[in-house]
Image (cartoon, rainbow, N blue to C red):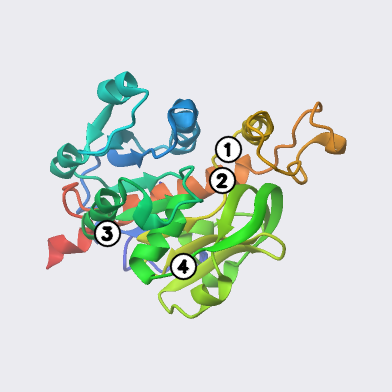
Amino acid sequence: MPIIVSHTESLPAYKVLEQEQVPIIRRYRAQQQDIRPLNIGLLNLMPTAAKEATEIQYLRMLANSPLQINPYYVYFDHHKSSSGGDHMEKFYRKFSEIKTIGLDGLIITGANLEHYAFEDVHYWEELKEFILWADRHVTSTIYGCWASHAGLFIHYGVERVDLGAKRLGIFSHKVNHEHESILTRSMDDRVDIPYSRWTGIPEDAIEEIEDLQVLIESETAGIHLISSKNGRRVFVQGHPEYDRETLAREYKRDKENGVKVNLPENYFEGNDPNQKPYCGWMANAHVFYSNWINFIYQNTHYDPLKPLMEEEES
C-alpha cells in the first residue's frame, strides 16, 4: 500500500521513490479516500474446460495484495456458453447487473477464437459494448491474450497478424524501465513470460500510436505488455497468470486433438515432455498484478460507479 506523504515534507528519499514509481500518495488525496474493498471484474472468455482453472490463476494474482478485493465474475446478458451453464448461473453476474454495481478494475481473459475474424465472433457486439462502457467507467482494464488483440482493434484499429505457427513456450523479455510505469515498478530487467497463441500484434503499428507505451518486449517473441499513457488500458499478450503445468496441459490437449504444434520452447527439462516443466515467471507476475492493484487504489473514486478520484475535485 502507498506511503502517505505531505506536500510540505521534503525528505530527499520521497522524491527518489516517486521517480521510481514506488507507491506514494499525497496526504490531501489520502484524506479523500475512505478505504473500502476494490471491485475487480473478471470477464472470463475461456471455454468451459478451462474456465475454473482461469479463475484460480487470476484470483491467485489478485490475492497477493494487502488491499481487500471484491471479485465479480462477469458474463454476457444475451450470449451464454452452451455448456457449463450451472457454474455461470451460480457464480457469474450479467453485464447489466455489473453496470449498476460498478467496477474499479476489470480483467478480460483470452479466448480460443484466434482463427475467427472479430466480427464473426457471436458475442462480438456485446463484448464491444462492454469494453466501451468499461473505458468510461472503470479505472483500469487489463486485456489478456486474445482480448488484447480485440481491445487494440476496438480502441486503435490495430489489426493482428497470423504468426503461421503457434507460439508456445517460455520466452525471455526486456522490461523497458525508461517509461517509468507503475505497472513495471520493481520488476527485474529481464522477465520470462509464457506464450500460447497463433496471432500477434504488429510492432510497427504500435510504434505509430502516440498514446501507447511498450513496457515489456522480446527480441524473439515480440511485445508482451502495452499500456496507454494514463494506465487505464493495459494489453497483455502473454500469460503471466499461468501456473507451472498450464502449458503442459495445453500441449497435451493439442496433441490429442490432432493439432500440429511444436514442443513448448524453454519449458520441459531436456525438452522431454515427461520431465518437470520449468517455472520462472511467477514472482514477476505477482509484482505486475500488485502494481496494477496499487495503481487502481491510488486513482479510483470512492464511488465504484465513478472511475477517477479527481472527479471529486471538479
Disc 3: which residue: 135
Residue 42 at x, y percent in the picture: 35, 39
Please tell me which of labels 2 and 3 falls first in the chain: 3
Q: CA distance from mark 4 to mark 2?
A: 20 Å
Residue 159's label in the rendered image is 4
Vertical relation: 127 (above or below) 42: below
Vertical relation: 182 (above or below) 95: below
Disc 2: which residue: 239
Q: Amino acid at mark 3?
A: Asp
Q: Does the CB distance between marks 1 and 3 fall below 8 Å?
A: no
Disc 1: which residue: 242
Vertical relation: 298 (above or below) 211: above
Q: CA distance from mark 1 to mark 2?
A: 6 Å
Q: Residue at x 28, y 33 (%)?
A: 80
Please tell me which of labels 4 and 2 falls first in the chain: 4
Q: Residue at x 53, y 68 (%)?
A: 214
Q: CA distance from mark 3 to mark 4?
A: 20 Å
Q: CA distance from mark 1 to mark 4?
A: 26 Å
Q: Amino acid at mark 1?
A: Tyr
Question: Is 31 in front, or is 261?
Answer: 261
Q: Give the left or right position of residue 303, taking residue 67 as reference.
A: left
Q: Does the CB distance between marks 2 and 3 fall below 8 Å?
A: no
Residue 279 at x, y percent in the picture: 70, 37
